[in-house]
Image (spheres, helix red, strand yellow):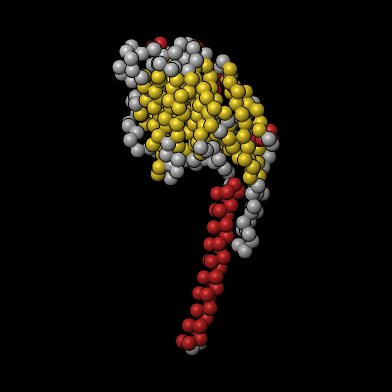
Amino acid sequence: MSGATGFKRRERRAVVRASWLGVMSMAVASLLALSACGGGEPRLPSPPGPAPRTGTPGETGGEQAARVSGILFRTDSLLATRVHGQRRELPPEVAGLPDPLAPPAELERQDFLFDAACGGVSCSLTAVGDAGEASDGGVPDGFALDELDWVTRASSAWGSRHGITLLEAQADVREAKPDTPDMRSLGAWMDHSGFVFSHALSVDEGWETTWRYGLAGGDLAGTRPAPLRAFDLVWRGVLIGSSANGYLPLQGEAVLTYDADDRSLDAVFSDIYDLANRRPHSVPLVRFDNVPVGLDGTFEAGLGGNRIAGGFYGRGHLESVGTMEQLGIVGTFGARRQEGG
């Protein structure tokens, strides 16, 4: 065999090998893409870190969990956001390598929405439009007081703002079922009240369902706040939520200002931060002005998509928690009364 002939054969083998590797690379890439969009075992995204200017945790999950049962015993108020979610049909399992030239699998995706109506310590959910099918994928019929008992000793301390330590809790299930969805929750319990925002995922009969909602509640003060002197009262805290139309965890600053003269509240949620992409959210600020406060210390204003509901909790109205939705953001918040107010 001449040197030139051997070189050509080696060159042909190299071309064939390169071509085969290229096909395999495309196949593996297709499998990865398919898995990412539902072909593998779906999971909620990994939790991001807190927003800038969030301090170190002031307490542990065990410390909050130790006092929750006592607060729940006194709790007489439960609030819930609307439930937003998506449902999509998963592609069939891939047996062997996919055709690298075939177009990617098309996944049907359906947005859904449930309205929430709350009274006392329970909230009922009502499907809007065709959302009823989503209840087959794990979305509950409503929320009860025990839904607020989400904190465990294993909950991770996440960060702190204005003396409120945020905790993260997860429930991961090997085979997600409607009654045991994967869930990731972020929120806090103070001394008289708590708030939490949850992302959930379940898989059943070839369908993947994801949904998001916020809850808040506690031991209502039962009266309007009253100033010791003639000035406005201020509560400062934190907002936790998401984009209503998809998984996009958000964190922001919450400031509630109560005007004792006209018995109304201004609620401002600012510095809203996109935790997933580590940047300010496209909607950096939302607000609700002149929200009337009832004789029992509760407040609410607006309708679905542009609504706030909450209350003042504990003796001395030391805390305020609630739910909100505006400009495509759905969330829940907690705040502490400031010194001197």
Toward the left, the furthest residue is 340
Q: Residue at x 52, y 70 (%)?
A: 18
Q: Nearer the viewer, residue 30 or 336?
A: 336
Quadrant occupied by the C terminus? top left
Horizontal arrangement in the rendering, residue 239 relative to residue 245 (left or right): left
Toward the bottom, the furthest residue is 2
- Residue 101 in sight here: yes
- Above or below, 145 relative to 36: above
Q: Nearer the viewer, residue 254 or 92?
A: 254
- Above or below, 31 relative to 203: below
Residue 260 at x, y = what percent? 40, 16
Q: Nearer the viewer, residue 236 or 48?
A: 236
Residue 301 at x, y = what percent? 52, 24
Q: Quadrant of residue 262?
A: top left
- Residue 219 in sight here: no
Q: Residue at x 44, y 22 (%)?
A: 265
Q: Residue at x 40, y 42 (%)?
A: 280
Across the whole image, how many numbered discs are drawn on residues?
A: 0
Residue 70 at x, y = what percent? 46, 13
Toward the front, the furthest residue is 262
Q: Residue at x 59, y 37 (%)?
A: 85
Residue 71 at x, y = what percent? 46, 14
Horizontal arrangement in the rendering, residue 284 relative to residue 141 (left or right): left
